[in-house]
Image (cartoon, rainbow, N blue to C red):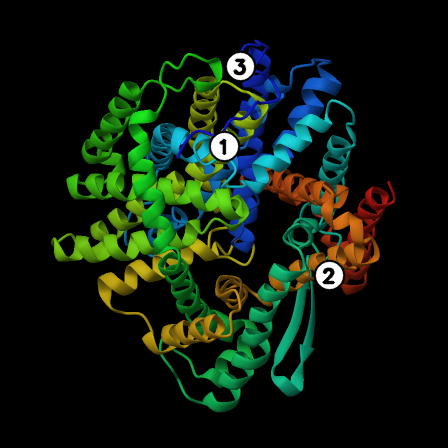
């Protein structure tokens, strides 16, 4: 394919500030903040948000409003470095908490900060290096073919900074509002974090959290994805749980050790969800992830073949500034060093087979991720599906090779962790390089910036995970870590054969039924797997956005202030969540605990109404404009 003639916003012959101390330092701060915030969010609800657009807005606000600078490429460098934190966090939280869960069960020692850092750094560096030779083939040669929706949105945000700074104000307002609400609920404990209503005749309950971040997730996702998630929740909590209780009676069914009647009487519908529904959800999620990969196989093969063909065209020393990549020799040397490190470094606990699998799967899924993101955006990139497929295949191969027991399971999760980070970061980097391509950035400088952001985020995420685990514990009601729990169940099931397969296959066939009627099975599967108190507020957020867009038809096409405000809600709550975790670990949480004055359900309803009103206000202001 011939290179599409394209003139970027900043021509190749024009030199403007780009890779500066200001852009690097600001980008590093954003990478750490977005990494921590998304780690907290993902461990709670099993979903993360793309940080590219919020990072672009904040970058534009910081460089133009606060620092009074006027270089769009400098702002782009800030968002390039800053958005790396979200991708590293997503890859880490989907897998590494499984190691903490095994440590609690006494199977292995608790993973150290060094172990987590080495695993994430290896994945982060490989994710960046694998994407560098793919840039020419995927970003340049397929310009006009791959839309890269979020890259185009970031470009528009940065270009709009030339005229208007209202987007940054919306994000900062959301961060402040969310921080206050989160501190009132989980810090001062003046208000309950969830509202629950028992439904006796169905032997279940309706529950919803009132945290701003989860409602913000729903607003960003929109009504379609939110409704699919909620449909899965309805199926789990208003069909499957009542059916299990009604037909199970006094029976004791594996994996539970008490009768279904006792479980319900002592723990309510939540005990049934914990004992049975999460296995149904695990089967549904695994099947949905694998089906999504199977459906994409033709696209994957074409992408991989095209990318291999484009390797020789990667411009290390192109004539133009906008064609210069990091030298391919450095890329190959870096990949070799990381592969040897994975093989030989004791803290990683992986052998030569694991190193080979990581290199093969890593480059393959980096290619797939970059192309998928170009078509559907980072938010819809099936990273968890790739991780599940990797862990399934890796566990089988390790078991066949004789690497069994706890060591084999740790190796499988290590492989999955590195591949998950690789896929997530490659997808994010392709968006950033596309934004740079449209604006006229220097690829080599962006790639160096991405390496900096990825490594810094990888080094900081281990501390965040350890802090959150010490504060609340993975697998708890505060941090359910749904994706990591799923990876743990899959690994144990393949290695030991001890999964309740009947419940797992119930989930598999629910996914197959959803696929037959052409319903997005992955979203429904997540809804089954998550507690209803998480899918319900996501639905509330989706309904708010639908109502706004139904009232104002043109607002659906805009870069809505409501979306930016919701992004701020997620970032603000994540930051306060990390701060509260630190307070808890230091033993200072009792000093701010005012739970004796808790307003109960009434206070929860009032806070929920305030959140809905705040999102609506910002969305309507933009719509009127």
Residue pictured at 46% horizontal, 70% vertical: 515
Q: Give the residue at mark 2.
A: 543
Q: In this rendering, does residue 193 appear at all?
A: yes
Is label 2 or label 3 in front? Answer: 3
Left or right: 452 as drawn, with respect to 183: left
Is label 3 or label 1 in front? Answer: 3
In the picture, the disc for residue 12 is 3
How many residues crowd mark 1 within 10 Å: few (<14), some (14–19), many (20+)? many
Q: Position of residue 251 (x, y in %)?
A: 41, 88
| First in residue order: circle 2 vs circle 3 | 3
Q: Secondary structure at mark 3?
A: loop
Residue pictured at 35% horizontal, 17% vertical: 316
How many residues crowd mark 3 within 10 Å: few (<14), some (14–19), many (20+)? some
* Relative height, residue 550 to residue 341 (above, below): below
| First in residue order: circle 1 vs circle 2 | 1
In the picture, the disc for residue 84 is 1
Q: Are marks 3 and 1 in contact (CB under 8 Å)?
A: no
């Amino acid at each position: 394919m011939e290179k599409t003639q394209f003139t970027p916003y900043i021509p190749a012959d024009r030199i403007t500030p780009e890779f500066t101390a200001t852009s690097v330092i600001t980008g590093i701060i954003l990478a750490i903040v977005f990494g921590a915030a998304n780690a907290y969010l993902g461990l709670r609800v099993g979903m993360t948000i793309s940080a590219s657009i919020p990072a672009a807005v904040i970058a534009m606000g910081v460089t133009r409003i606060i620092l009074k600078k006027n270089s769009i490429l400098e702002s782009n460098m800030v968002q390039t470095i800053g958005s790396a934190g979200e991708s590293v966090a997503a890859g880490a939280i989907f897998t590494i908490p499984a190691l903490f869960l095994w440590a609690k069960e006494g199977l292995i020692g608790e993973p150290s900060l060094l172990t987590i850092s080495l695993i994430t750094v290896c994945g982060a560096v490989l994710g960046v290096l694998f994407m560098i030779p793919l840039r020419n083939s995927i970003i340049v040669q397929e310009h006009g073919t791959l839309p890269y929706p979020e890259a185009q949105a970031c470009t528009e945000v940065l270009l709009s900074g030339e005229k208007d700074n209202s987007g940054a104000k919306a994000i900062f307002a959301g961060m402040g509002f969310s921080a206050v609400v989160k501190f009132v609920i989980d810090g001062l404990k003046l208000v309950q974090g969830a509202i629950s209503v028992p439904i006796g005749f169905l032997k279940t309950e309706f529950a919803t959290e009132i945290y701003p971040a989860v409602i913000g997730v729903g607003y960003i996702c929109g009504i379609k994805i939110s409704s699919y998630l909620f449909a899965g929740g309805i199926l789990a909590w208003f069909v499957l749980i009542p059916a299990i209780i009604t037909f199970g009676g006094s029976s004791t069914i594996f994996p539970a050790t008490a009768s279904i009647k006792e479980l319900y009487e002592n723990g309510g519908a939540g005990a049934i969800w914990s004992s049975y529904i999460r296995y149904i959800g695990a089967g549904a999620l695994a099947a949905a992830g694998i089906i999504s990969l199977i459906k994409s196989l033709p696209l994957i093969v074409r992408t991989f073949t095209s990318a291999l063909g484009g390797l020789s065209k990667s411009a290390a020393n192109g004539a133009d500034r906008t064609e210069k990549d990091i030298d391919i020799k450095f890329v190959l040397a870096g990949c070799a060093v990381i592969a040897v490190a994975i093989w030989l470094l004791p803290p990683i606990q992986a052998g030569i087979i694991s190193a080979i699998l990581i290199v093969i799967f890593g480059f393959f899924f980096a290619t797939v991720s970059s192309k998928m993101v170009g078509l559907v955006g980072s938010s819809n990139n099936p990273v968890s599906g790739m991780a599940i497929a990797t862990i399934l295949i890796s566990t089988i191969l390790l078991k066949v090779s004789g690497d069994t027991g706890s060591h084999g399971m740790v190796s499988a999760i290590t492989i999955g962790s590195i591949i998950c980070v690789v896929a997530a970061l490659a997808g994010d980097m392709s968006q950033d390089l596309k934004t740079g391509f449209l604006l006229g950035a220097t690829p080599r400088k962006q790639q160096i910036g991405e390496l900096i952001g990825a490594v810094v985020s990888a080094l900081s995420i281990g501390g965040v995970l350890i802090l959150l685990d010490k504060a609340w514990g993975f697998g708890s009601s505060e941090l359910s870590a749904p994706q990591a729990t799923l990876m743990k169940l899959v690994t144990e099931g393949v290695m030991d054969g001890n999964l309740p397969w009947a419940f797992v296959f119930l989930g598999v066939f629910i996914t197959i039924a959803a696929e037959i009627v052409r319903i997005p099975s992955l979203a429904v599967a997540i809804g089954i797997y998550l507690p209803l108190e998480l899918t319900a507020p996501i639905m509330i957020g989706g309904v708010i956005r639908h109502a706004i867009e139904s009232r104002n038809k043109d607002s659906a096409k805009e870069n809505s202030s409501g979306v930016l405000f919701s992004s701020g809600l997620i970032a603000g709550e994540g930051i306060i969540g990390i701060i509260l975790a630190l307070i808890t670990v230091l033993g200072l949480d009792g000093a701010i605990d005012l739970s004796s004055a808790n307003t109960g359900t009434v206070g929860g309803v009032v806070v929920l109404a305030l959140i809905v009103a705040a999102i609506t206000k910002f969305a309507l202001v933009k719509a009127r404009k």
